[in-house]
Each structure stands twice: as structure tokens, then as C-alpha cells.
Image (tube, grey):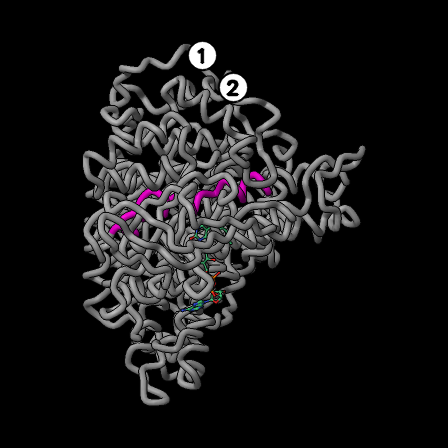
Amino acid sequence: MTTQASDMDTESITMFRDSASAFLDAVDQRQRVRALEAGGGGFDRDVWQQIADMGWLSILVPESLDGLGLGLAEVAAIAQECGRHLLPEPLVDAGVHPLALLCALPVSSARDELIKKLSAGHTVAGVAWQEKAGELEASNQLTRATSSHGQWVLEGQKRFVRPGLGADGWIVSCHLDAQPALVWVSADQAGVRLSAEQAVDGSLLCSVSFTQVEIASSQLLALGPTAQAALSRANEVARIIQSAELVGIAERALSLTRDYLCTRTQFGKPIGSFQALQHRMVDGLIQVELGAACLREGLAVVSSPDAGEQLWASTASRLKSRCAFAACEMTRMAIQLHGAIGTTNEYDIGLYFKRAMTLSSRWGNPASHRRRYAHIVGASRAAVPATTDQAEYTEFPPDARWDDMPEVEFRRMVRAFFAKHYPAERRYRPYRQTWAESKDWYMTLSRLGWLAPAWPKEHGGMGLPADKLIAYIEESEAWGVARPPDQGLVMVGPILMRFGTDEQRARFLPKILAGEQVWTQGYSEPNAGSDLAAVRTEAVIDGNEFVVNGQKTWTTWGMDGTHMFMLVRTDKTVKKQAGISFLLVDLKTPGVTVRPIQNLAAEREFCEVFFDNVRVPLANLVGELNQGWTVAKALLGFERLFTGSPKHSQHTLHQVEKLARQRGLLEDPVFLARLTELQLDTADLGAAYNGFAAIAKRGESIPASISMLKIWSTETYERLALLLMESADDYGGLRDHCLTDEIDLHVVAPLFNALGAKIFAGSNEIQRNILAKAVLDLPS
Ligand SMILES: Cc1cc2nc3c(=O)[nH]c(=O)nc-3n(C[C@H](O)[C@H](O)[C@H](O)COP(=O)(O)OP(=O)(O)OC[C@H]3O[C@@H](n4cnc5c(N)ncnc54)[C@H](O)[C@@H]3O)c2cc1C
């Protein structure tokens, strides 16, 4: 299984990933883990030397010190492979962390010499900085170097040090003359004592104590704020790379479990055919994908030269909390899905679980990183999302060459357009808008030529290339532009361009653009919901016409609709998908009856539509007779991306934050913990969305794994909607927009909307079925 993170590798990353995978595959690392554990823990120095010889330890080291001078993404790719293979050697603790720290220090001969020895593998060292469980920054309260007879003497103790046994020494963080300092201490110096405890994955965590340890001036590596800043940065680097390792662990646990589900048989079939297990696997897959997406985005964020300390810290916390959570969830679930054998020490799956547990607890566990994230982002929470960067509005140039326009400029132009033309009072409407409410806006877009961004220019559209189209839709969502009844634009138009005749295109497309036709989608029926191919509404040919009888239901905008594109049964004798046709129907035709249905919010969102001997011209058949299923399936495209858009979650999150400020909830630690979890869920949804959008922008076909977006976006939306309701206390039961001095929002609308969103466009259970088959390839 590859995730989005590995899909987007550059050449040098792929090279490191492949060579790491080949090296790690050559020997079964899981057997090495067992052997090392049985021998008392630790690691193998010969293997460490091979790692150094392959250049893994030199990646972050500048070329001036014989390093490769590459970035974190290359190290992350290797760490991900180490996670997949369970390499027992402490790559992050003994490789990434000390070298990242040394490289961040001011140049000195002691530093340079140590960098060379460490990256060559001749010296193995760790950083001894932590004194208490749960510390995320070095406090140095217990470890101090004081002046004595012209040199320093170090006293104190460090905990959770790795490597401990087998290390040649440590870079020790301490207070020296009341300033933070980093000093080099050799393992064989007098006064250094070590005690080791075995972690659940067989590795060792040590306590190192220093009693009257003499520190020469040549051992002082850094003093003062520089030492503190370098250590903080190195800690973040370690967390980010450890997150990559955790993603690797989760990925491999997923693929091993998948293989097991395909081979283990119970009740006469592979257990992977049971839907309960398939859906749990999909939830694991979602976590793996989120971890990978978050990792990819995090690496990009910190690679920017403008990334300051706060951004590094919040990014590292975001990554660590997501990736550790993903690895722990996936590996724990893997044990359950293996049954009893999963709980044994002899079977390998438990090794992944125990490695995930060990790494999750190290460098701050998910809960402590969520707390830190909350603390960091708390300062910026008062800010309203920025939508102010607009260009001076100029009329849309009808012959504009969009390809030539930089995306940033295009976005600014679109924002300026919305700011000028979209009625302010219609921004962020709580519920779906009717035609009466949105007609003016539709006609404005039509008049100015902005109505059909996706349509080619020859059909009257803007002809936007994929990247600009996505930008256009994202900007419209960010501006809170309500979607008008647009199924003619987003569904019928593209279908007719692909499957329709010239006559059909000439007959329908101009009327859609002119706002003369409002189209509705007639797929669902009382007995054809998720099982759409079971449609029974029948169309029988009689002369030049079809005669349609039956019923459609849940027809959105049915009260406004002038037309319907519908699936009808035209052959009952063949396999159900093979006897369906795609028809265009004028809803004013005699025999059509439309009855509105109120949804939970008492809105007339959809209708049921009855057909009683409705005569439809044969010329309204789209595509071939009985080929309607193929036509219907072709509608999947960008839509799949936008049903997973983070817009609803992002907007609801802002609502929750606004309410929390108004009602003083940010002081409540329980509320804050839940809010932070949802902030991270929303941020990671954005990362996953951006990954798929990047694929679409490159014009590549969108992979089947995109179904995870719809699930995660609608379920995150629902969790946010519930928090909004809960945070509103008594207002949580009110039907309409609440406006008092302590609240100004529609409390219940997001929940009602989220409930619908989990059902339409393929329910979340159906999306899980799709992922189980198309991505995990689980048996039927
Ligand atoms: C707000 C809204 C707008 C809609 N707009 C339109 C529209 O404009 N046009 C249109 O044609 N339709 C529309 N629909 C209908 C929508 O497409 C269907 O509701 C959807 O396909 C589910 O069908 P169903 O409601 O009959 O539920 P069912 O298929 O009866 O499902 C009931 C439950 O069983 C689960 N389930 C069903 N099959 C399986 C399975 N194989 N495995 C696991 N679980 C399963 C479902 O996930 C669901 O939880 C809309 C629905 C909503 C809520």
C-alpha cells in the first residue's frame, strides 16, 4: 500500500526510500527485534555502521562537513521505511536528533568534530535532555554544571535517554552558570552511571546520572539562548521524523492485517468478506491516509525558510498527535482482527503494536501534543479567518487566458469578484437555498459570464483549467457563497457534452446558462437507495416517445425544478445495471406530480415526484438505450473531490470558536481538549483534501481512495456540529438563528446538514464498502 505521502515523492526521496526498503528487506528485522530483546535490548553497532555507510546519518549534515546537505523529506522517507520494517536501531534518537542539534549550533571545532564522528558512525551518541515524564522542553532543573577549580563539574540526572547502553556518550542539556548549556559527556567518564529499563518493544530507555563529572572547556558545545533554541528545534525535528516512522508502522500493520483477512477462513469464507471487519479496516485506512497527508503537509510547512519557532512547534505537535494516534489505533485494531493469535508474542503483528506504543509515549504522547497545540494556536484563535486579500475589482475579461495567470492572482481576482457582486446578507446561509432565493445571483453570474467555470468556452463557459477551477470553487466556498440550484451546470451540462447529441446540446445548454431551466436529479426511488441499480421507474417505447411510470424520491430542489435527468428501467430481462437508460424530462409534461417533503429542519429541501403515463420524446434519451448506468457513473469526477471538501467543517469550527469566545468556554480544559482534537481533525482533513486536489490539478485521474475524504469530512462535520450544539447549552434546542448578547449563530443547522451529508452522494457505509473493495481489495 502506498499513501499520498509516498505518491508525491521527488526523485531523491524515491531513491532513499527504495534503497532503505532494499536494505531493510535483506534481513527480517522482526527476527532481529526478537533476538535483541532476548539478549537484553539495545542495538547492533555493525548495523549502525552500515546505516552510516549508506549515508542516512549524513542527510541533514551540510556538504562543508562531508554531509549530503539534503532536507527532512529524505530523512522522513527513510524513517517511514524503518517504521514499515521495524528496524530496531534508534535512527531518530541516535541519528536524527543529535545531528539535527549539532547542525543547529554555532560552528566550533568541538561541534564539527562530533558531527563528523557521528555521521560516519564511528561514534554513537544520544541527547540527554529530559528529566521528568511528559516534559516537552528541557527544564534542566536537576542537571547543573558549576565552576570548580577552573573547570566545571556536572551533577544531576536525565531520564528516558536513548541510546543508553552501547552509546559512546551524550550531548547533555544542563544549566551552566545559570544559563542553558549543552555539553558533551563521554560514557566512560568518571561519575557517569547508567541504569536501563526495557520498553515494550524490546528497546532500552535509560536513566543517566552525573556525580561530580568533570567537564573541560572543550566539552562545552553551546551556552545561553543558542543552546536552548537549537535543542528546541532538534526536538521538533525528532518529533516530525518519528511521526514518519509511525506512519510506516501504521501502513505495514494495515497491509499485514489486510493479507491476514484474505487468508484466514471462518464460517467457510475469508474473514475479510465480513462487512464489520471491512469497515473497521477502512477506518484504519482513513487514519493511515490522514497521517500520511498530515506528514506531507507538515514537511512542506517546516521546509519554508519563513517557518518560525511557533510554526515548527505547532506542526510537530500536529504531526505527532495524528501519526501516533493513527499507528496506535491501526495496530491495536490489527490485534483484534487477528483474533487470539494477535495477542501472542510469537506472532508478528504484536511487534507493530508494541513499537507504536513505545514511540507514541516518547517525545510527548498525542494528548500532551494536543495540549501544546492548543496552547500555541490559542493566541491566534481570536483572529477571524483571513479573506481580505483582494485585488481591485476589474470586469472579467471574457477572452482571458487563464493558463497564463498565476493562481494567487486568479484567487485574488475571484475574491474581488465575490466581494463586489455577492450579496453580503446571503453569505454562509444555514440551509440549502431555493431558486427564488438564489435566482438573482445565478442571473448575475450568467450576465457576467462567470456561471459555468468548468464548461469549455465554446459552450459559453469560462473554460478554466483544473487548477483554476478548483481555486474558483474553493474561493466561492471560503466566501460563503450559497450553492444555487446548479445541477444543470454541474451534472447535465458535462453529461451532454460527453454523451449528448449536437441537437441536445443546442436545445439544453443555452437555457441552462440563461437560467431558464432548473434541473433536478431523479435517481433514488423508494426501493432504490444505496442499491441504485434497482430502479423500477419504467420507460416503455411507444412510437416516437417513451411512456414513463413510477416514482422518484429525495429529489433535491424538486419544488423549483423545471426538468429532471433520470434513470429509468428500459429492459427488465437483463442484469439490472444493463437495463437502465438516462432520460431528460420536462417536469411540466402532463402526468408529473411533485410533492414536497420537509426535512428535519422543516425545510422543503427535497420532493417525491410521481410519473403517471408521462410521454417523453425519444430525442431526450442520452447515450444509447440501456447504457444509462455508464452515463450515470461518468458523473463521478470533480464531484468526488468536492463532496469531501473541508468547507463545512472549517466553517463550523469557526462557529464553535466564535461561540466559545462569546460564552467564555476557552477557559474550560475539557472543552478545550475537545476543541483541539477537532481543530486537528479539520486541519488534517484539509491536508488530505489538498493532496487529492493536487492530483486533480495535475490532470491525473483521482484514485479510488478519495472516498475516504467524504467519510472523514462529513463525520468531522458531524462531530463539530455536536460540539457546537453542546456548547450552546439551552440554545442547543432552538430551531432558528439565535441572536442574543451571548450568541449569534444558527446552532442546529450544521447537525441537520451533516446528517444528510453522511447519506447523500453515496452513504458513508457505501463509501466504506467501496474502499474495502477498490483500495483494500478485500474479498466478497
Ligand atoms: C439531503 C439529501 C438530498 C438528496 N438528494 C437527492 C437527489 O437530488 N436525487 C436523488 O436521486 N437522490 C437524492 N438523495 C438520496 C440519496 O442518494 C439516498 O438517500 C442514498 O443513496 C441512500 O439511500 P436510502 O436513503 O434509500 O438509504 P438505504 O439505501 O435504504 O440505506 C439505509 C441504511 O443502510 C445502509 N446501507 C445500505 N446498503 C448498505 C450496504 N450494502 N452496506 C452497508 N450499509 C448499507 C446505508 O448506508 C444507510 O445507513 C438525497 C438524500 C439526502 C439525504
Whether pointer 2 and pointer 1 mark residues with C-beta atoms closer than 8 Å, the reply is yes
Does 564 sit left or right of 177 as displayed? left
Measuring 27% from the left and 42% from the top, which residue is drawn there? 495
Q: Mark 1, residues whose alpha carbon is within 10 Å: few (<14), some, or many (≥20)? A: some
Residue 173: percent from left, percent from top = 53, 47
Q: Is residue 272 above or below residue 479?
A: below
Q: Is residue 697 above or below residue 540?
A: above
Residue 4: percent from left, percent from top = 32, 50
Q: Which quarter of the rendering shows the C terminus?
A: bottom left
Q: Is residue 644 above or below residue 32?
A: above
Measuring 23% from the left and 43% from the top, which residue is drawn there? 619
Measuring 58% from the left and 41% from the top, which residue is drawn there? 431
Q: CA distance from mark 2 to mark 1?
A: 9 Å
Find disc 1 in the rendering and name its residue: 393
Residue 144 visible from this viewpoint? no
Q: How many numbered circles does the render carry? A: 2
Find disc 2 in the rendering and name its residue: 419
Q: Main secondary structure of the magenta part?
A: helix
Taking depth in this image into account, of 649 and 27 the one nearest to the observer is: 649
Q: What's the amino acid at mark 2? A: Ala
Residue 647 within the magenta-colored segment of the rendering: yes
Q: Which residues are magenta?
A: 631-652
Q: Is residue 284 above or below residue 479?
A: below
